[in-house]
Image (spheres, rainbow, N blue to C red):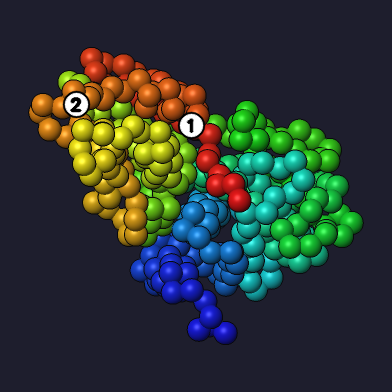
Amino acid sequence: MASRVPLQVRIGIRDHWDNPDGPLERARSALRELIGVDIEVKATFVPSLATCAQAFLSALSTLADDESNAQWMDALLERVGQCLKADISYRAAPKQEGLGLSWSSSRGAFAIHVPEYPMPSLIAMGSFFEGQLLRCFEDKQAPAESPDREASSDDWADVSVDRATGQPAVSNTRQPLTLQTRPEVDALPDISTIPRLEELFLRPPYHLIVSESGRSLVEVHCSHSPSLELLSDYLKKGCRVNYQDMRLPPVVDIKLHKSSFGLGSTYDLLTLSVPGRGSASHVTPVTVLAFVEGVLGYKNVAVEASTWTFRKDVEFRRTR
């Protein structure tokens, strides 16, 4: 069965999940030493889930290391028995769009729901987990859907954070919950938990810069390769032919340039140039700007001389 798992997935599991020297295993070992029980974390593997697991385990370690939480730790250990279990999944309960934490009293396990995009930062996840873990053993609450099955009566206690507002989105709970706030600081992620470049740059925010050099060159730099590919295909389709040349080339040379980073065919630069100094043709950025804003939906954030800077925060999804 293991041989059927794609090579990239096996490499990812080795580097992020099973690496004894990785940040996840260090967090798991630190918590095991503090509470004295085994730690079992399940997830549909991707690097961002490893970061979430690290934040969850680190939050538990922070709470366990604080003597004022002794009563809460006793309650936790009483419930988890000899093994603390947690399931991490992208699948969320109905109407749950942000980071979520659930506790199953019958299974003795935590369930963590992670938003696909945008992924909360390590510090933001840690702050959320610390605050909600301290509330997870309060009065029983109405059932909510678990990551892999329908919950039984009084099985799951659920709380989540709405991505749009940043406020708790409580599902069928008796008392409203509030987030603990911290100073606006963040932590650098471990390099082993960061997705590969070609995966990372498929996620928003996307950045795009258009620059003009005279009437013979326009450059488009973009972190989102599919945006450049679509722009290139569109311009090639509409470009006129140079009938003064027997080879009938396009009047503008439209060229995609591969990124120097990442694997595969990832592009980060598109150039539009007019070949030859004596050419009567020219190229301007107006068509590019119209396409970038009117079709791709990028928003202009800055203009300086002959350079236009754009940004898009809404994720692109390919249509079939």
List x then y, in percent, for residue 53: 53, 58
Q: Which mark is in front, 2 or 1? A: 2
The answer to which quarter of the image holds residue 211 is top left
Label 1 is placed on what type of residue?
Leu
* Callout 1 secondary element: loop
* Label disc, if present, on residue 296 of the rendered structure: 1
Between residues 179 and 319, which one lies in front from this camera angle? Answer: 319
Who's the residue at 67% across and 41% down the image? 97
* Dot 2 amino acid type: Ser
- Disc 2 and disc 1: Cα gap in Å? 24 Å
Q: Which residue is outermost to the right?
A: 153
Q: Nearer the viewer, residue 243 or 277?
A: 243
State the image coordinates of residue 318 (x, y, percent, origin top left): 55, 47
Is 236 placed left or right of 62 in the picture?
Answer: left
Position of residue 28 relative to residue 225, above or below, is below
Quadrant of the image occupied by residue 239: top left
Is the N terminus in the top left, top right, bottom left or bottom right quadrant?
Answer: bottom right
Query: Mark 1 or mark 2, which is nearer the start of the sequence?
Result: 2
Instruction: Give the x, y percent position of residue 158.
Output: 74, 47
* Residue denoted by label 2: 216
Residue 45: horizontal and vertical position, in percent? Answer: 53, 64
Q: Which residue lies furthest to the left in this view?
A: 277
Q: Is the residue under label 1 in contact with that under label 2 (CB below 8 Å)? A: no
Q: Would residue 193 be found to the left or right of residue 313 on screen?
A: left
Residue at position x 75%, y 41% in the image: 95
Structural crowding at the residue carrying mark 2, measured as other residues with C-alpha within 10 Å and reported as few (<14), some (14–19) or many (≥20): some
Q: Disc 2 on helix, strand or loop?
A: loop
Query: Would you say residue 186 is visible in this rendering?
Result: no
Which residue is at a point 63% across and 71% down the rendered structure image?
83
Q: Is residue 161 visible?
A: yes
